[in-house]
Image (tube, rainbow, N blue to C red):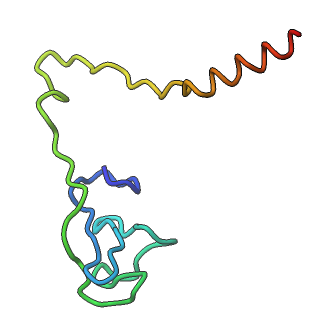
Amino acid sequence: MCRWGCPTTATTFMCKFCGTRFCKECLRGDFTGLMLEPGRCRVCNQRKCQGDRVENIEVSKTMTSSRGSKSAPVRGRSESPTKKVKSAKKKKKRKR
């Protein structure tokens, strides 16, 4: 799946003139709206702008197993230790 929501993979390319990333399939990219033509960059308006393919998503063996088990859920970042210390100091000051 590309980052703009179309179901295809390996269709994200970069403009070789300005570096803007776009999907060749859904014509969406790092800009507002859609591309007017598949071969013309929306940002720099250059023709034949398709450069290197980027963000190639390959399915690894750990993601697809024969048992169909799911991987562990990704946990968010915990609160930083400095915030905990600051909040503890504030609580102590309030008690006095």
Q: In which quarter of the image is the C terminus?
A: top right
Q: In which quarter of the image is residue 54?
A: bottom left
What is the number of callouts on the image? 0
Q: In which quarter of the image is residue 91?
A: top right
**71 above or below 13?**
above
Q: Residue furthest right?
A: 96
Position of residue 20 relative to residue 4, above or below, is below
Residue furthest out toward the bottom: 46
- Give residue 8's position: percent from left, percent from top: 26, 54
Q: Is residue 83 left or right of residue 35?
A: right
Spot occupied by residue 14 in the image (x, y as percentages of width and height): 28, 71
Q: Is 79 or 47 nearer to us in this picture?
A: 79
Quarter of the image where one finds residue 25: bottom left
Q: Residue at x 31, y 65 (%)?
A: 23
In the image, residue 41 above or below residue 29: below
**Image height of 78 relative to 33, above or below:** above
Please name the residue shown 14% across and 35% down the image.
Answer: 60
Say left or right for 9 vs 67: right
Query: What residue is at 29 percent from the left and 84 percent from the top?
Result: 17
* Residue lying at 73% horizontally and 19% vertically, measured from the top left: 89
Residue 55 placement (x, y as % from top left): 25, 56
The image position of residue 1, as x and y in percent, is: 30, 49
